[in-house]
Image (spheres, rainbow, N blue to C red):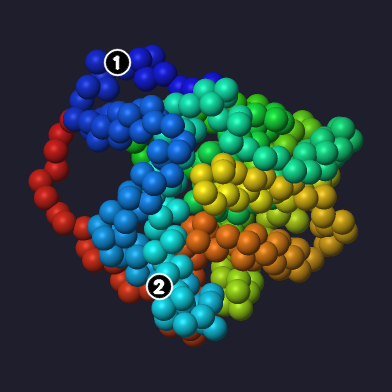
Amino acid sequence: MAIRLLPLFSLERLRPRYWAAWSTLLGFALVAMLPYRVLVPLGRLIGRALYLASPHRRETARINLGLCFPDKTDAERERLLSAHFGSLGMAVCETAMAFFWSDRRLAPLVRLEGLEHLQAELARGKGVILLTCHMTHLEVSGHLLALHQTISLMYRAHKNPLMDEVIRASRSARAHDTVERSDVRAMIRELKRGHAVWYAPDQNYGGTSQVAFVPFFGVPALTVTTTGRLARMTGAAVVPFFPVRLPGGAGYRIRVLPALEGFPSGDDVADTRRVTALVEDAVLAAPEQYLWVHRRFKTRPPGENRVYPRSPPKPRGKRRVT
């Protein structure tokens, strides 16, 4: 189901703090009116604009690619960087699709393989951790899977209340439930109820003791170790699924893999290494589609130097009272 903007309207939301959110949503709504064959070149155009307008994100991605693909030449990494920003631009269009396209418009775009692996685990009456990673098309790929199998989607709370409500409403429209990323208790509750929960542990979250430095493309990366712990606490199976955006505007392929055997092993760090290896395989299948603008290596092991330049201070102006 597509979200509708009118029920979100109120006099309170005419205040200036909501103007940027309304502008963004209006832009998404206009983009969503276009057919997919038009969105593909539009996404590349948006990506080029992002490349030019986002020097700090561009540098973050360039550093990440240099760390993870040291064997590539500078020219090869620059081509990959450019393709990545094209993928980011397409992600803008895909967010509009996830928000405003109907199920009927979305359904023809997905080729789903291996759904029987997920359904077999759910038939056991226990929960499933749907293990995936942060690809640029993650907003739409979760919706595409939810068209064929009821799942619970995770989300990150947005600072703007209007955007937060839109994101939750969009995901709730197709999912069984939504779980805020930091709400571990809610995730455990969903798994114990026998539900499938979308889960991507491949970012530097920090702020938790349940982390370890695990190699990601040979570079130590601070990684949450909770995948094995969640499986052990809930009895849930871990079923990997990795979407990819197909070339030529052909849509998306979602491959659901068999549940991990011998998981959890009882060694949380070893389990995290195994999960990270699966993420690496998924990234190598479509490297330009991974979220390289994330500062994955922000936290360094003791004694190692920072890899990213310090961000410039934000301009300080008069505080607007709204």
Where's residue 38, x and y in %? 40, 38
Residue at horizontal 72 percent and vertical 31 percent from the top: 149
Label 1: which secondary element: loop
Looking at the image, residue 148 sits to the left or right of residue 218; the answer is right
Q: Rate crowding at label 2 as few (under 14), some (14 to 19) or many (20 or more) other CA atoms within 10 Å.
A: some
Viewer-side residue, 114 vs 18? 114
Where's residue 79, x and y in %? 42, 69
For the residues labelled 2 and 1, say whether their Cβ atoms are less than 8 Å apart: no
Closer to the eye: label 2 or 1: 2
The Cα atoms of the two marked residues, 2 and 1, are separated by 46 Å
Viewer-side residue, 87 vs 270? 87
Looking at the image, residue 211 sits to the left or right of residue 315; the answer is right
- Quarter of the image for residue 308 reads bottom left
- Quarter of the image for residue 195 reads top right
Viewer-side residue, 214 vs 33? 33
Looking at the image, residue 12 sits to the left or right of residue 298; the answer is left
Q: Earlier in the sequence, mark 2 or mark 1?
A: 1
Q: Callout 1, which amino acid? A: Ser
Looking at the image, residue 311 sits to the left or right of residue 149; the answer is left
Q: Callout 2, which amino acid? A: Glu
Residue 224 seen: no
Is the N terminus in the top left, top right, bottom left or bottom right quadrant? top right
Label 2: which secondary element: helix
Residue at horizontal 26 percent and vertical 19 percent from the top: 12
Where's residue 280, x and y in %? 64, 66
Residue at horizontal 70 percent and vertical 40 percent from the top: 112
| Residue bearing the label numbered 2 | 78
Residue 273 seen: yes
Viewer-side residue, 219 vs 316? 219
Where's residue 272, x and y in %? 70, 64
On residue 10, which mark appears?
1
Residue at horizontal 47 percent and vertical 63 percent from the top: 292
